[in-house]
Amino acid sequence: MNQTAMHASNKKPHRDTIFVEQAEILNHDGFAGDQYIMRVQAPKIASHAQAGSFAHIQCASSLAMRRPISIMRVDKDAGWVEFLYKVFGEGTRLLSLRKVGETLDLFGPIGVPFKLHADRKRPLLIGGGVGIPPMIYLADEMRTQNEFTPFVIMGSEVPFPFTPKPSTIMLPGMPDGTIACMPLLEDWGIASRLTSTQGYPGCFDGYVTDLARQYLTALDREQRDQIEIFSCGPTIMLKAVAQLAKEFGLPCQVSLEEHMACAVGGCAGCTVKIETEDGPAMKRVCVDGPVFNAEQVFF
């Protein structure tokens, strides 16, 4: 092997696509349930991000460990990146105290993104809690391609970080009164519905998979054959989504949520067991994922 070939074979797959940026906070708004939406100026990360990507954020100079947070939206032309996060521990608590005009140290975009397939033109996107942001990003990507008609189901047990409104987009299989949607998606012309067990007005009373099952059951065979499921959320929810996909014989991609230390594959602290063509293997969620085929993870 000559030197050029050796260099090519040793090149890391993520080299030249992950950046460290000093990102100015443009907006930082708090919502009920200790939830926050933060927009930062990070043009390099924005230009390379894809749906499913996340950034490793230094929440405060006093904390050595960064926190991985999924990207919810980007504007590649304006150069901003937006995150939705919930306060869970000390890192995100300190992040919630950061002010507009301050600078954050960001490392990203990281991770294998969702993959779209042209023969599945009616994608079903299912997000739960802090798994909602990648679904919004994915819906936005589908919107720009003009060949998909996605339906987004979002579930939360705390108030949603936006003011729901009644949807004007009709869908099969929706129970009476299940009309609450996300205004941003509605403005994009993308159908969405909200679920919760907390009795929020207009929301489906139950889990995301309960509503998804009613929707899928209401479709005919030809319509179901155009569906691929994409999902992000707590592991227990992803297991239920994977089972739903198996029940209806549908392909399904899931984005896993795992604790991460380095987020670049060096520490192997976020490994999960994945079924491959060559048998079981341990894969790193940060760089081999976070997106995997559901059947590889759960079956």
Image (tube, rainbow, N blue to C red):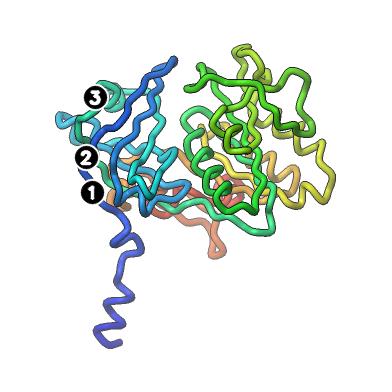
Question: Visible in this render: residue 220?
Answer: yes
Q: Is residue 214 left or right of residue 13?
A: right
Q: Secondary structure at mark 1?
A: strand
| Amino acid carrying mark 3 in the image | Lys
**Residue 26 image point, x, y percent:** 29, 32
The image quarter in which residue 259 lies: top left
- Please report whichever mark, 3 or 1, sits nearer to the chain's N-terminal start: 1
Mark 1, Cα crowd under 10 Å, few <14 / some 14-19 / many 20+, is some
Cα distance, mark 1 to mark 2?
7 Å
Asked if disc 1 and disc 2 are in contact, CB closer than 8 Å, the reply is yes
- Please report whichever mark, 2 or 3, sits nearer to the chain's N-terminal start: 3
**Residue 38 image point, x, y percent:** 35, 30
Q: Secondary structure at mark 3?
A: loop
Identified at 68% across, 52% down, the residue is 121
Q: Secondary structure at mark 2?
A: strand
> Which residue was labeled with disc 1?
20
The image quarter in which residue 168 lies: top right
Residue that protrudes farthest toward the left in the picture: 62
| Amino acid carrying mark 1 in the image | Val
> Which residue was labeled with disc 3?
99
Q: Is residue 130 left or right of residue 6?
A: right
Mark 2, Cα crowd under 10 Å, few <14 / some 14-19 / many 20+, is some
Identified at 59% across, 13% down, the residue is 198
The image quarter in which residue 92 lies: top left
| Amino acid carrying mark 2 in the image | Asp
Residue that protrudes farthest toward the bottom in the picture: 2
- Please report whichever mark, 1 or 2, sits nearer to the chain's N-terminal start: 1
> Which residue was labeled with disc 2?
105
Residue 134, relative to residue 4: is it above or below?
above
Cα distance, mark 2 to mark 3?
14 Å
Cα distance, mark 3 to mark 1?
20 Å
Residue that protrudes farthest toward the right in the picture: 220
